[in-house]
Amino acid sequence: MSFRGEESGGEDGGRTASASDLRKPFLHTGSWYKMSSAGGGGGMGSRLGSSAYSLRDSSVSAVLCTLIVALGPIQFGFTCGFSSPTQDAIISDLGLTLSEFSLFGSLSNVGAMVGAIASGQIAEYIGRKGSLMIAAIPNIIGWLAISFAKDSSFLFMGRLLEGFGVGVISYVVPVYIAEIAPQTMRGALGSVNQLSVTIGILLAYLLGMFVPWRILSVLGILPCSILIPGLFFIPESPRWLAKMGKMEDFESSLQVLRGFETDIAVEVNEIKRSVQSSRRRTTIRFADIKQKRYSVPLMIGIGLLVLQQLSGVNGILFYAASIFKAAGLTNSNLATFGLGVVQVVATGVTTWLTDKAGRRLLLIISTTGMTITLVVVSVSFFVKILPVNIKSLAGSVATLANWLTAWLITMTASLMLSWSNGGTFAIYAAVCAGTLVFVCLWVPETKGRTLEEIAFSFR
């Protein structure tokens, strides 16, 4: 099946076939519509037709679409990394206590909880692209509120707004990427989401070394400011379009994503069968989650997200500069930047390995490494090697659990570190060890399997 047509001469002056009459997608459906262009002259129609030919030949690939929506996770990462290099300056300028700054850092997770609750329904009713548009607006407003804050009230309000946007982004972007990615590239493209988060964190760490915190908050506007116009140039998720009954738009979107020379008949039929099967089912209620087909994947999703947060990752990322300072490093911001670089490199390597080694094996290796290193850090603080100075329902539920745990960690991290650096990292290490056991016992491998195959395996 292909939309690549050939020109046909006729009595009406030689109109081109449908493939040459494509135009850019609208925000609502994201499909590449056919439009008639009269044959003659250098009018608007012929210019659009000529442009469509070059556009058609290059096509909009899943990779390009992924890179555009990856601006959302970059915004997410920038939000996570913002509090680390700015802690001392914000506390000094606005006269905050350590507890008030901890509250500021954790409020993004409170906002994200609200965003997580709404994200599933928003993504279902207005689509993946429309959801990202909605998420971008409060992010921009939030950064402006922080930039102009004169007291804690604007600071807290801005952080909450950022969090709401991040909560929606954290659900919608992985879903969109999974739904547009070819089966053979789903792991690699899915990893771009986390890679982008680490890039956002790195940018916050890097820029925070050179610019004041108010300027840094203004720079936080950029990812979403670029994302908004970018959304007009990518197709909507084919699976969402099929679910909404927009079958012509669905096939057009899928053809654009796979290339106009690609036969998409098999994939079209697979998605149609999946959609038809889902339509025969009644609306899922919380009581239905007890069924194995829903409870097992939901438990795995929630388990991985919660255990990831309980490992202390957000506490470390949000307050990295303070942790390094407590460890006696003279240039804690530079060490924090090094942490950001390591994250980007490690995530980049994971992106390359995901579809080769499989997700389960990488989870086992990474949680083993995290457990060992956190134990080492904990012991080093205790013995003073270093000086111590101080899909929609299920998706929303899992994302909510993630942000609830993230709030708990970021709210308590600074207070726990002031209690005991070694004790804090010992607790995080114990959680990582538990995560390793959880992955070995419960998490299945998904390498080389379609989304429909993965869903069927839980029945």
Image (cartoon, grey):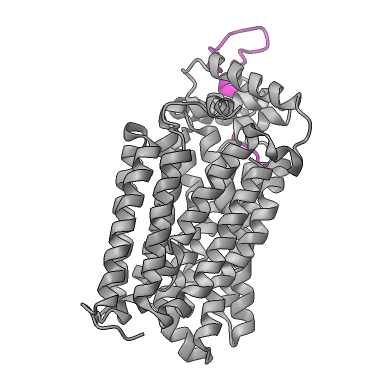
- Looking at the image, residue 171 sits to the left or right of residue 348; the answer is right
Coordinates of residue 332 in the picture (x, y in percent)? 29, 77
Looking at the image, can residue 46 be seen? no
Residue at 67% of width from left, 31% of height from top? 241
Give the magenta part as a residue range: 1-27
x then y, percent, for residue 234: 55, 39
Is residue 390 visible from the viewing direction of this image? yes
In percent of width and height, residue 337 lies at 31, 68
Magenta stretch: includes residue 136: no
Residue at 61% x, 73% y: name it: 158
Residue 285 location, quadrant = top right
Nearer the observer, 391 or 148: 391
Residue 168: quarter of image: bottom right
- Taking the spot 43% from the left edge, 58% from the top edge, the residue there is 431
Near-viewer residue (394 or 375): 375
Measured as percent of width and height from the top left, residue 59 is found at: 47, 29
Q: Where's the C terminus, which quadrant?
A: top right
